Structures are given as structure tokens and as C-alpha cells.
Amino acid sequence: MFCYNEFPIDYESCLLYISIFPKDHIIKRRSLLRRWIAEGLIPERSTAAGGKDQVRSLEDQAELIFDALVARGFICPGETSSSGKVKSFTLHHIVQDFITTDVSLVDTCLLSHLTHRVSINNGIALQEGPDSNGPPDVTQALLESMPRSPQWQLLKVLDLEGCTGLKKRHLKNICKILLLRSDRFEESFEAVRLPSSIRGMKKLEVLSHVEVSNDVADIINIGQLMRLRKLGVVLHNTKGVLNLLFQQIDKLHGCLRSLSIRINQQISSESSPDAEVVPAVVNPPKLLESLSIYGIKTGLPNWVTDLDQLSKITLQNTFLGEDSIHILGKLRMLRCIKLLHKSYTESKLCFKVQEFQRLRFLVIEGTDISTVSFDNGTAPKLEMIVWSFSTLEALSGVNHLPKLKKLELNGDCNLDPVKAAIENHPNRPKLNHIQ
């Protein structure tokens, strides 16, 4: 039941903001929450701990408002993430009509406030046309006009999702918008180096899928972005660079929520003699909720044990041993693990008793792991397992997973033992097999 009149004014403002999207448009939750915060729709709260807690409280408050909109039926959830959060949604038709017509007639003061946010500090979504091989002319013209127009300096949110083929000069222009808090161009730029002007974007909160050169200045610039919540970098050579990158992560320990590090280099089954050891940090990024590591072959960072808020981890080409799995098993908030190609070196993957107490989703991919076992008392909340393999020798302990709902196996194997275990399971989990 819709209860608009019972909402506080900040809840109403956030709901009205969604009206900028077309009807039936699929909206991404994380993008919307970033927009709310960047537009100043989430009220700031003073805390004794200062800036670090303030950044955290804004995001938590945005999540609270979003959950309230879902609970009241204003939002229709779509895709959900492996950690159980809504990833995308649509606005109910009745709600869309209500907030674009009825509310505008009776709530003119609030609408005026929101219109100012959208038109003056507005977020602009530039989408590539379906029949275009590059960014549309209007997109090119807008991005080229940035240096000449003072109005661009008022922009706080820039959404370039869907635009491909943009050039380095466009990124340089974007970096001149000093008030920009959130820009989405994860798939918009190809092989673009991080420009030096990025250091001036003090309010930037999201910076992902950017290539970082071996230039010391490029990496140091990242450490100047003290409001950064999401960081994703691509390195082509770790020599002398990885240590400096982790020094910048140390500086950002009070704001980072999501971190992705990808090293593009030739991967071998053994660490090379000059492989750079993962450096230690004085101040671990304890607010991290998501961590992705690709290509660091010298083990997990030692500060992983301090990540009390980590709920999702993705690993690839990390060549971890059994000890690292036990370290992950002790993380109290971990809900999703993705062990991708060459992330684990052993053929047997064992989940020990009292480990992974909140794990809900497990994804295993690769040719090395042939046996997976679950001890009694491990992963009591595990709901879904997806295992892609070249050889399956054994899958044991499925009966020890009381919450299991779905098991997906990708590869050629003898299903009879697995079917027998599923049939004896009290939940009768759904079994999918793709050869």
C-alpha cells in the first residue's frame, strides 16, 4: 500500500527524483543511491568521529530510504545480487503517474526544490543510440563544450553508461568538473590512461575501470581523492607500482567501500622470482564491502583479516593455497565468494567446520579443482553453489548445508551420486546440469 504522506521530506525528495527516468526504465540501485548522495538529497548527519563516519552515514541513510521505498511498494525489484541486494528495479506504473502529476499539484514547494537539484546541479545520462557505431553527435558536442561553458562547473552527476568509443580528450574535459561527485564511464573509455587532472576532483566518489601507468604521479593522484568509495584500477606492470598503489589505498581507508585491482600480465602456474610481494598497509580499508583481485600471485593482502564488513570477494589468477581459504572462512560478514580461473592451486577444496558462517553464494570456475567437500557445521546459510569444472571427482557434504536451494554443475560428470545426495536433502535443492 502506498503511504506517500507518511514519508519524511527527504524520503519524498528521493522518490520524486526517480521521476527523471522514463516509464518502465530499468534503474540500477547503486547508480540511484550515488545520485541521491551527489545531489544532496540525503541529509548529512554530524558525528563525533568526523568525516569518515559522515561518508558512511550518508550511504547507510540512502540504503535505508531505498529499502523503505521497496517495503512500501513504490519500487518493483528486478535483478538481485549474489549478496541478496536489489541490483535493478522499475517504478510501479501507478507511482510513476502519481509523482509526475498528482504530487506536482499539491507539493509545489518540494517539487521546486527537487527541480533545482535536477536542472542546476543536474545529472545527465548520455546513451548510445542502438544503430550507432560510436557516441552520438549530441554526446560528442556536449563533452567538447565542457571547457567553454561555465555551467558545466555546476554539474555533480554525469552518467555515461552505454556510451562507447569516447576518447582521452573527453576524459580530460570531465576531470575539469571540480564539483563532480559521481561519474559512470566504466565501459565508455577503452585504454585511457588516468589523466593528471583527476587530482582536482576532490568530491569524486566512483572511479573504476581505469588504466594506471607506471608514472608515480598517476598513482599518487588517486590518494588525493579522499571521498572515493569505489576504486577499480588496471595495472600492466607491478614492478615498483603495486607498493605505491597500496600506499594510496592506505590513505583512502576511511572511505573505500569497493576495491578492484586487475594486473594484466602473462600468468604462469608458478610465481616468478621477481613477483612483487603484496605490501602491508598501516590502516586497512575496514569499510570495504566488495573486493576483487585479478593477477596478484603472491597471496592475499595480510589486511584481509581486518575486513569485518567484507560481504563479497572475487579472485582470479591468484594461485592461493588452502591456508588462504581458511582465512576467508573467518570473515564474519562474507556472503559471496567467486573463485575464478587459477584462483586456487589445490585439487581439493575443503570447507571446514565453523567457517563461512554467513556465506550464501559460492561460485567456482576453473580446471584445477576436482573435489569439493563440506564439513558438518560449515556454511550453514549457503543457498546456491555454481561449479564449472573439467573434471568432477567428488562433491561431498551437501547434506551438511541446511539452507541449500540450488546446485548448478557445468561440465561432464557422473550425476548419480549428486542426485542421490539431493534426493536425501530435506530442502530438495534444485539441480541444474550443463555439459
Image (cartoon, rainbow, N blue to C red):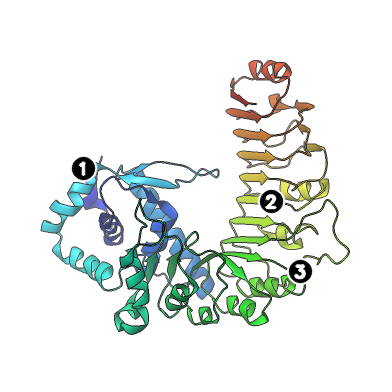
Q: Is residue 134 left or right of residue 198?
A: left
Visible in this render: residue 309?
no
- Packing grade of label 3 (10 A; few <14, some 14-19, many >=20) is some
Give the Cα distance between marks 3 and 1: 53 Å
Whether residues under marks 3 and 2 lie with C-beta atoms below 8 angstroms apart, the answer is no
**Residue position for label 1:** 94
Q: Position of residue 43 (x, y in %)?
A: 36, 67
Between 67 and 405, the one lying in front of the other is: 405
Q: Quadrant of the N terminus?
A: top left
**Residue position for label 2:** 315
Please give the label number shown on residue 280.
Answer: 3
Give the Cα distance between marks 1 and 2: 43 Å
Q: Is 354 rendered above or below residue 415?
A: below
Q: Position of residue 365 (x, y in %)?
A: 69, 40
Q: Position of residue 297 (x, y in %)?
A: 78, 57
Q: Quarter of the image holding residue 134?
A: bottom left
Residue kind at label 3, given as amino acid type: Ala
Assign a secondary structure to mark 2. Answer: strand
Question: Which residue is depicted at the point 66% across and 58% down?
Answer: 307
Residue kind at label 1, given as amino acid type: Ile
- Packing grade of label 1 (10 A; few <14, some 14-19, many >=20) is few
Visible in this render: residue 26?
yes
